[in-house]
Image (spheres, grey):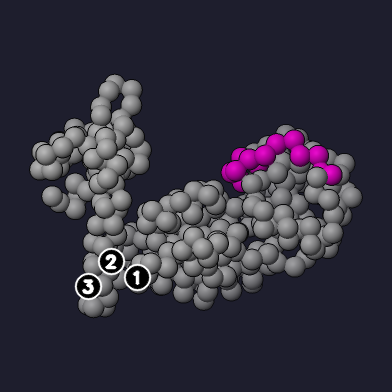
Amino acid sequence: MEIRQLKYFVSVAETSSFSEASRRCFLSQSAISQQIRALEDELGTTLFLRNPHKVTMTESGEELLPLARQALKSFETCREHINNLHGMLCGQLNIGMSSFIEPYIRQAAIMMLKQYPNVRLNLMYLTTPELNRLLQNHELDVAFSINKANIDEGIESTPAMTFHLRAVMRSTHPLASLEKVKFEDLLNFSIVMPEIGSRVIKSVRRYLDVDIERLKTRVVVNDPNAALNLLHDTNFITFLPARYADNRPMIVAKEIEGLEMPLQSYAHWMQDICQKRSAEAFLKIIKEYSVPYCQSMGL
């Protein structure tokens, strides 16, 4: 039994597909199938039921899955300990983030790649529930979102960076000439609402003391770029960090009166594993580079 076979097994189990697992593992489908067959032969049992449309786990597969995940986690922990012993900073760093704060993480990622050329970054843009699930499955080393995780889920959270929420619209919008917009101004226009999380909604309500439900929400999207694309040919308004208006000449970001205070984002990791040195380095870059950079840019 080899670590790589367990990795391929977990990938097939999580995707219910040999083809999806092959893409995740950067290996051909036939190679994945061959390694799974070898694992089944060694264990003397069938792990998957295969048919042309779906792959399902057998009872043996269901029993093996948590053990395989634990073995992979232990293997990664061992490798990190040895790397730490030799003072190396290398390997892969799996980072998950809500797309809402992607521009801020991007700044840190660029600096990380410059400072640590032997570290490979795997960046994934996900919803908060997906971030929590992948953290708990130990598929992410660190995650960033605008919601604080529940401590009873075994997830540690620490403040990462602040950002300002803006009313974003096209430059020819009737409100674009205003220095600041009021909540009452926003009620006259259709809204593209990003999935910004319950914590941000609560913060907005606390600062503005307004009923968010009064807004004319016409579209809800989980991708800020999709929200921005909807603004170009309409008088719709969306709510995003100011950073998203950068390098978009037809888009402007306006302060919302009463919402001048910055909002907080968080970094998350699992409490039951040894944190990678590369994750520690990335968090340090966030603190010492990304946060000051964003503050200097008024973001």
Q: How far apart are labels 3 and 1 at the CA level?
A: 12 Å
Mark 2 and mark 1 residues within 8 Å of each other at the beta carbon: yes
Which residue is rendered at x = 64% and y = 72% of the image?
296
Q: Which element carries disc 1, helix, strand or loop?
A: loop
Region in magenta: 214-227
Which residue is rendered at x = 36% and y = 61% of the image?
93
**Closer-to-camera residue (251/76):** 76
Horizontally, residue 88 falls left or right of residue 215, namely: left
Q: Residues within 10 Å of mark 2 (few under 14, many from 20)?
A: some
Q: Is residue 20 positioned above or below 86 on the image?
A: above
Between discs 2 and 1, the one toward the N terminus: 2
Residue 297 picture quarter: bottom right
Per the image, the residue denoted by label 3 is: 82
Amino acid marked by disc 3: Ile
- Residue 290 horizontal/vertical position (percent): 54, 69
Q: How far apart are labels 2 and 3 at the CA level?
A: 9 Å
- Residue 169 horizontal/vertical position (percent): 75, 46
Q: Nearer the viewer, mark 2 or mark 3?
A: 2
Q: Nearer the viewer, mark 3 or mark 1?
A: 1
Q: Residues within 10 Å of mark 3 (few under 14, many from 20)?
A: few
**Closer-to-camera residue (53/62):** 62
Residue 222 picture quarter: top right
Furthest residue toward top = 52
Between discs 3 and 1, the one toward the N terminus: 3
Picture disc at residue 203: none
Which residue is rendered at x = 48% and y = 63% of the image?
155
Q: Can you see residue 78?
A: yes
Per the image, the residue denoted by label 1 is: 274
